[in-house]
Image (cartoon, grey):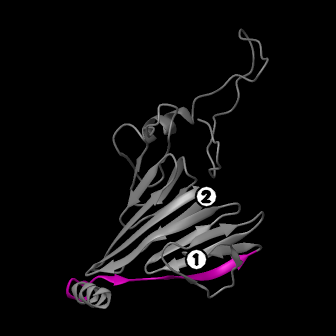
Amino acid sequence: MKKITVILFMLCAAAYGIFAQSGTLKEITGTVELKPAGASAFVPAQAGDEIAQDTIVSTGFKSAAVIQIGSSTISVRPLTRLSLAEIQTTSGAENLNMNLQTGRIKVDVKPPAGTRANFTVHSPSAVASVRGTSFEFDTRSIKVIEGTVSLAGGKGAEMPVPAGGESCIGNEDNAADPAQIAAAAFLPRPIEGADSAGGTLSPPRTTGEFGVGTQY
C-alpha cells in the first residue's frame, strides 16, 4: 500500500510539473559544516557537496560559503547558520524557502526569461520575500541591492524595500519605512559631551554593511 502511494505521488508531481531540486556548495572558505536531514551531527563540507532539502549549513569564524540553487546564489557570511526548508521547481517557477537562524547572507536571484523565482527567507524575527532580486539580510536588517524585497515582522504589514533601500525590524516588531531610514541617515548628531550652545556637530551619518544588532 505504501509503495502504491509513493508511485501515485510521483505520477501526480510529474503531471503538475513539480520536481524536487538540490543545491551545490560552489565555494568554501575556512570552516564550513553540513548537517543533512535526519543526521545527528555536523560533518565537514567540501566544494561540490550537494545541498538537499532540510540540510543545515553552518560557517565558522572567518569562514564563508557560496551555494548555487537553480537561478539563486546564496553567499553565506561568517558565523551563520541556515537551513533549506523547501527547494522545488514547478512549471515555470522555482520555489526556495530558507530559515536563517543566525548570521548574515547575501542573495542573488536571477531567474531566466520565462521563469519566476519565489525566494523567501524566514528568521526568528522577520520574513523577506522576493521575486528576482539581490539583497543582504541578517535576521533583522535588510539592504536591497537590486529589485524590491518585502520585509515583514511579527506585527504590521509587509514593507516593500526598493533597490538602494534599507529596513529593519524595530522594537515594536514591525518593519521600518525605508524612506524614514534614508532621511535619518543624513541628520547631524551632536558629538558626545559637546556644548549645546556652540558645540560642533558630527558629520552626516552614513550606513554600511549590516550586522546583527545594528541600530538606527
Q: Which residue is at the front of the view, 47 or 39?
A: 39
Q: Residue at x 31, y 90 (%)?
A: 3
Q: Earlier in the sequence, mark 2 or mark 1?
A: 1
Residue 83: x and y in percent read 54, 67
Q: Is residue 26 magenta?
A: yes
Q: Quadrant of the N terminus?
A: bottom left
**Where is residue 12, by image quadrant?**
bottom left
Q: Which residue is at the front of the view, 163 or 172?
A: 172
User: Residue under circle 2?
Assistant: 104
Q: Amino acid at mark 2?
A: Arg
204 w.r.t. 189: above or below? below
Helix, strand or loop at disc 2? Answer: loop
Residue 157: x and y in percent read 33, 41
User: Residue under circle 1?
Assistant: 36
Q: Amino acid at mark 1?
A: Pro
Residue 116: x and y in percent read 31, 73
Magenta residues, as a range? 13-29
Q: Quadrant of the C terminus?
A: top right
